[in-house]
Amino acid sequence: DGGITQSPKYLFRKEGQNVTLSCEQNLNHDAMYWYRQDPGQGLRLIYYSQIVNDFQKGDIAEGYSVSREKKESFPLTVTSAQKNPTAFYLCASRDRSSGRSYEQYFGPGTRLTVT
Amino acid sequence: SQKIEQNSEALNIQEGKTATLTCNYTNYSPAYLQWYRQDPGRGPVFLLLIRENEKEKRKERLKVTFDTTLKQSLFHITASQPADSATYLCALRLWTGGSYIPTFGRGTSLIVHP
């Protein structure tokens, strides 16, 4: 099955610890995205990557870091510098090369709770 | 500043009726607009895309309109069913000067009562 996987589904961490969220896709998509969603809020873009070894900050990149060493993987690290890390994190990908390049495919999300 | 607005209040309707959701935007001139469905605790799923030169788009019981003069898109679900209950998000792509960035509204929750 093709798709995007995020792991784990639920993640608990103590304040002050860095944590890395996994995002893998086997859709052969060039572009990948990380969003954060808070209750009753829309999706806010954290980071995005259009190609391997390149990524750009979104609207709320402070306190987060990413890497894109492989086309299929785009892990997100939530650092201790992020003031309010508890949220629902969504990873998405998009095929830039096809005629359906506007559609984003989302993973199931990771719910991070920091106490 | 650019803004996308969707009704924050939940829309409650009876099964069989038509649900109409609104997406308004300011200071954009988008080439197209998308609608997504999101179920609780899950990632959004793409439903429809409508381009600026299209007035209306249909897919099964779904219909989307796009009025670039009013800067508004309407999303209709005809013959609604309880299974249509979800949050519906509209999305535009904003040009940042380097690339197009997808930007989502907050979404409107639809509740279809049997």
Image: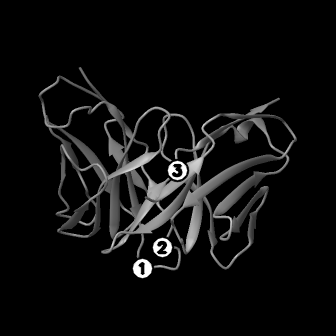
* Category of crowding for the residue at label 1, using alpha-carbon neighbours closer than 10 angstroms: few (below 14), some (14–19), many (at least 20): few
Q: Say which mark, if any, is on residue B105.
A: 3
Q: What SS does tag 2 mark?
A: loop
The kind of residue on which mark 2 rests is: Ser
Q: Which residue is mark 1?
A: A97
Q: Say which mark, if any, is on residue A101.
A: 2
Q: Is residue B88 left or right of residue B97?
A: right
In the rendered structure, are the residues bearing label 1 and label 2 in contact, judged by CB atoms less than 8 Å apart?
Answer: yes
Q: Chain of mark 1?
A: A
In the rendered structure, are the residues bearing label 1 and label 3 in contact, judged by CB atoms less than 8 Å apart?
Answer: no
Q: Chain of mark 3?
A: B
User: Residue at 55% across / 75% down in the picture?
Assistant: B31
| Quadrant assignment for the C terminus of chain A | top left
* Category of crowding for the residue at label 2, using alpha-carbon neighbours closer than 10 angstroms: few (below 14), some (14–19), many (at least 20): few
User: Residue at 15% across / 39% down in the picture?
Assistant: A79
Q: Chain of mark 2?
A: A
